[in-house]
Amino acid sequence: MFLALFIVFIPFLFFPSSIFAGDVVLENTLTLFGDVEGFNGPYRQSLTLLGQEFESFFEISKGNHTLFEAGFFADGQEQQNIQFNVNPVLSFKYYTDTTKLILGTLENENRHGYLEPLEDPLLEFTRPIEYGFQWKERADGFQSDWFLDWQDINIVNQPEIFDYGGVTRADVDEHFDLEIQFHAHHEGGRIFFVHVINNYVPAVGFRLHGSLPVLGESSLAVFGVLSCDFEGQYITGPDWGNGFYARAGVTPWGLFELYGIMWNAQNFFSQEGDPNYSSQGLDPNYYQANRMYEELGFKKEITGDKDFLFDAEIKSEWADAAWALSGKMVATVPFNLDISIQEKKKDGIENAN
């Protein structure tokens, strides 16, 4: 931990102030979370996480279109005998009014917008930080987020692992959006590994959203999903699979969101998706070609004008003939500090860049 902090902050002590002169913000975010996954097989094991995350980094603005970020991210998943994992936050960002290019630490809020069959929501806690390259677009009626997340390099006894893909959404009108999603997972390497895993999961669909009397803000999402596992981890199922995903939500009187999810699939498998949507079980020999999954949940968000965010969710889940109750709570508190770093000229006159 101390080595990571030393590597990140030592440049601010020994490099000339002219290198860092500009608009600087120290951004900090504290997150406390609890997540209980009630299912205990055959697709996933029950799990309870009670942890905390803390992210702190300097955001240094250089010119009108570039940013540098340097800091650290610490997370621990137990309340007792806490052992923090500390990772650096290091990124370069180029941005315009509509475009953002990122090299280094990625922006991965809400799993880039993926559906649950493509990326497991639990990854928000078990893999909270990602590194690689990212391209984001946001304009009137259009938004897109595409990335490459490099997880491990290919060395002896360790394959290279990376995932990539993205989400693009276009507004047809005020209440109707079209959306495409794609996620791929790769394991292997030409140097030390012969066996290769490639899993591809594309999805296409639409979203309806708007306000209804009594029901408040309401939404409907419908997607068709495919899975391709030509060089897969398992040999129990065919290479191709498909699924139908639908999610409907209402917010009666603006109090909370009541939502339901329906999933119907055949031979579907996603390497990083929620296992409850998969045909492949935890046991490599367990395989269920035709899958049904349903979910009914309540979700409540409380915000304090960017001062804090509290998110609570409880859901009742049905996977084939099994039932479970799951839930989570997340409290997020951001607090930033503006810092003025000035450059001193040789004649002693200060010049703020």
Image (cartoon, grey):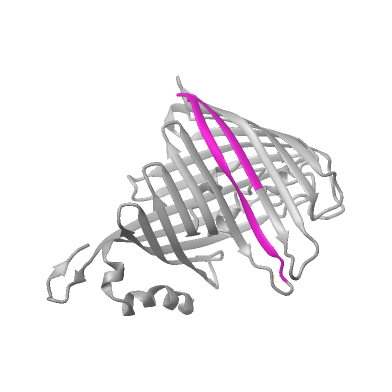
The quarter holding residue 347 reads bottom left
Q: Residue at the top extreme?
A: 213
In this rendering, does residue 221 appear at all?
Answer: no
| Image location (x, y in percent) of residue 50 | 55, 60
In this rendering, does residue 167 appear at all?
Answer: yes
The quarter holding residue 207 reads top right
113 lies above or below 124: above
191 lies above or below 181: below
Q: Residue at x 73, y 35 (%)?
A: 243
Q: Quadrant of the image for the C terminus?
A: bottom left
Q: Which residue is drawn at 56% across and 64% down?
A: 77
- For residue 245, side relative to residue 79 (left or right): right
181 part of magenta stretch? yes
131 part of magenta stretch? no
- For residue 283, side relative to residue 163 (left or right): right
| Image location (x, y in percent) of residue 51 | 53, 62
261 lies above or below 32: above
- For residue 317, side relative to residue 96 (left or right): right
Magenta residues, as a range?
158-183
Q: Residue at the front extreme?
A: 346
| Image location (x, y in percent) of residue 92 | 43, 60
Depth check: give the residue in front, 191 or 91: 191
Depth check: give the residue in front, 162 or 98: 98
Depth check: give the residue in front, 147 or 348: 348
Q: Which residue is drawn at 12% across and 71% down?
A: 349
| Image location (x, y in percent) of residue 59 | 35, 60
178 lies above or below 299: above
Magenta span dominant secondary structure: strand
